Image: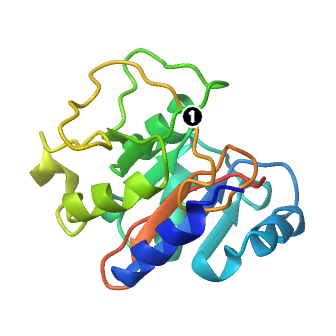
Amino acid sequence: HDPDAVPALVALRADGLRIGMLSNTHWPRAFHERFLERDGLVELIDVRLYTSEMPFQKPHPSAFLAAAGALGVGPERAVFVGDRPWDDISGARSVGMHTVLRPNPVAPPIDGIVPDAEIRTLSELVGIVRAWSINQPRSRRAGRRPRGRAGDRPRRAGHAARATGAVASGGGRRTRATTAPARRPWWTSGSAP
């Protein structure tokens, strides 16, 4: 459980964003849902997708497009928070999503895969999303790539990953979240604890 998960999701929802979760898993929905319920996250996540119920897993583009579609938003208006450079960041970028990486010591950096931002805690995510003004497509925001802390420069190559519930679930230290505003869309992905 990540103690920042509930406050971060509440703040994003207060900004009018819808929250989604995309989890690469072979376990059934019920397995994951009990952890989300335990951590008080079920009511805060509008859409919860598990690849055990889908034809493809991340990083396949169809998984990310399904997540954005379930939230009713185009991928260019979605933010994907993940802890895995290949599965999460490269997959989300391949469909035009904004990307945020939360470092995970188990998932080493991969040269050439660079997130739009990097965070250490979920509390940092709220400010990044607000600064990005998700209503603006990625192509119009080029060059504005906050890293998570004011004044930090964006990473140019490589990165580490881990999203401990990053806007979604809390337990498995592999949570990725996609957030989408009710009026302004955004998405998040995540693995169950």
Instruction: Classify residue 74 by image quadrant.
Output: bottom left
The picture places residue 1, in percent across and down from the top left corner, at 72, 56
The picture places residue 31, in percent across and down from the top left corner, at 89, 63
User: Which residue type carries mark 1?
Assistant: Arg
The picture places residue 28, in percent across and down from the top left corner, at 87, 61
Q: Nearer the viewer, residue 26 or 145?
A: 145
Furthest-front residue in view? 3
Position of residue 8 in the picture relative to residue 55 (left or right): left
Q: Tell me if I can see residue 46 in this picture.
A: no
Q: Tell me if I can see residue 165 in this picture.
A: yes
Position of residue 30 in the picture relative to residue 135 (left or right): right
Q: Nearer the viewer, residue 153 or 85?
A: 153
User: In the figure, 27 relative to 110: above or below?
Assistant: below
Q: Residue at point 39% right, 83% down?
A: 14
Q: Nearer the viewer, residue 73 or 178?
A: 178
Q: Residue at point 65% right, 69% down?
A: 48
Q: Residue at point 12% right, 39% down?
A: 143
Quickly name the residue at label 1: 84
Instruction: Classify residue 6 by image quadrant.
Output: bottom right
User: In the figure, 19 relative to 137: above or below?
Assistant: below
Instruction: Classify residue 165 by image quadrant.
Output: bottom right
Q: Residue at point 36% right, 52% down?
A: 97
